[in-house]
């Protein structure tokens, strides 16, 4: 039904779906902070697991729907393009956090480990694409490995969060993860959790609508699937991460902001697993283009730069932001230039 709409109505539906996803994500950010305090999970873990997974739901719906439709490039580029865009959002958040470099102030061992975990998870599909074309029951073994690596990484991240073997040096700009209200830990997390789940459902529905509009744009205008996936739908479905990151920074929940992006990106690698399972014409990793591979490499490079910034903890760099933020902006802009040149 959506595919048959006139172009003005199609774009209106696209905007409304994006708005629904963004508004839901704003409300979800505050609830995630409350859940983190009431369950004593901590902001980094809540950002990485709860908020990161929730705000990624719209994106996974887009990738899976594209894979079911047989468009491997759309499914793949939406996933890896979203990872690159969301990493860029941390640089934008660094710009608005004027007290000090965001990566300096939000020092947290769990975020460091999740960044390492993300690099590992992005390296697996790279190996699969360079290796032989194989699939068992339509699924590449790399997808199973990625899923198991994700589960193991989540468990290890929890261990790092609860029992860190090292702690960052505290400076006047370091923000500590403490409940805003000391009574929060004694309150039930059930009600905010139920509201949070309802918001997640809205995000998922919005993601489905966005995927339908994206597919229609590819068909109508003959656009490259990698262009629509990596630049249009990936950015739109990543808007919740941008909103939640900026909202978390404004609230002073810096670990939640950084953890939400890194954890969301980690969860986004499972888009590839779900897409490979949904793609019925063989291995997803061998059905994509060189442009899709470029976006995977871009996400991997940006994550490595971010990890370097989290370790370096530069208090203030060019323009009072970290040098890693400057580099991430340059890398992403270069990737956009390459994409439009290829298109």
Image (cartoon, grey):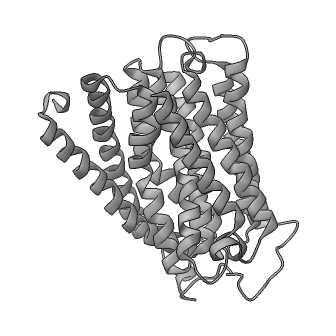
**Quadrant in the picture for residue 145:** top right
- Residue depicted at x 66% and y 36%: 297
Position of the C terminus, as image quadrant, is: top left
**Quadrant in the picture for residue 163:** bottom right
79 and 333: which is toward the camera: 333
* Residue 40 appearing in the image: no
Q: Is residue 152 above or below residue 258?
A: above
Position of the N terminus, as image quadrant, is: top left
Where residue 275 appears, x then y in whole percent? 50, 27
Left or right, residue 88 beside residue 57: right
**Quadrant in the picture for residue 125:** top right
194 and 21: which is toward the camera: 21
Q: Is residue 99 above or below residue 133?
A: below
Give the number of callouts.
Answer: 0
Left or right, residue 327 beside residue 191: right
Where residue 186 appears, x then y in whole percent? 55, 82
- Residue depicted at x 73% and y 69%: 108
Where residue 260 appears, x then y in whole percent? 56, 60
| Residue closest to the far right | 165
Left or right, residue 138 beside residue 103: left
Where residue 5 appears, x then y in whole percent? 13, 33
140 and 163: which is toward the camera: 140
- Residue depicted at x 87% and y 69%: 166
Q: Is residue 245 above or below residue 297?
A: below
* Residue 168 appearing in the image: yes
- Residue depicted at x 51% and y 37%: 79
């Amino acid at each position: 039904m959506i595919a048959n709409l006139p172009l003005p109505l199609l774009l209106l539906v696209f905007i409304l779906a994006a708005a629904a996803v963004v508004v839901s994500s704003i409300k979800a950010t505050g609830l995630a902070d409350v859940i983190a305090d009431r369950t004593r999970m901590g902001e980094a873990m809540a950002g990485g697991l709860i908020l990161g997974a929730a705000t990624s739901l719209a994106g996974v719906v887009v990738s899976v729907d594209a894979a079911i439709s047989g468009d491997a490039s759309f499914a793949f580029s939406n996933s890896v393009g979203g990872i690159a865009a969301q990493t860029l959002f941390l640089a934008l958040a660094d710009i608005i956090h004027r007290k000090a470099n965001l990566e300096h102030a939000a020092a947290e061992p769990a975020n460091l480990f999740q960044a390492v975990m993300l690099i590992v998870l992005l390296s697996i599909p790279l190996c699969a694409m360079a290796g032989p074309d194989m699939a068992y029951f339509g699924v590449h073994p790399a997808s199973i490995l990625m899923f198991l690596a994700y589960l193991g990484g989540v468990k290890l991240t929890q261990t790092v969060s609860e029992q860190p073997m090292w702690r960052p040096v505290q400076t006047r700009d370091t923000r500590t993860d403490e409940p805003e209200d000391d009574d929060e830990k004694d309150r039930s997390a059930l009600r905010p959790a139920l509201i949070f789940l309802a918001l997640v459902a809205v995000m998922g529905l919005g993601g489905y609508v966005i995927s339908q509009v994206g597919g229609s744009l590819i068909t109508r205008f003959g656009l490259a699937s990698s262009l629509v996936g990596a630049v249009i739908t990936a950015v739109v479905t990543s808007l919740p991460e941008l909103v939640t990151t900026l909202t978390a920074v404004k609230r002073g929940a810096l670990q939640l902001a950084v953890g939400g992006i890194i954890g969301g990106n980690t969860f986004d690698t499972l888009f590839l697993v779900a897409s490979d399972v949904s793609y019925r014409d063989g291995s997803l990793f061998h059905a994509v283009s060189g442009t899709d591979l470029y976006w995977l490499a871009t996400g991997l490079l940006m994550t490595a730069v971010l990890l370097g910034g989290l370790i370096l903890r530069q208090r203030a760099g060019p323009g009072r932001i970290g040098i890693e933020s400057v580099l991430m902006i340059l890398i992403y802009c270069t990737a956009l230039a390459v994409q439009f040149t290829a298109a």
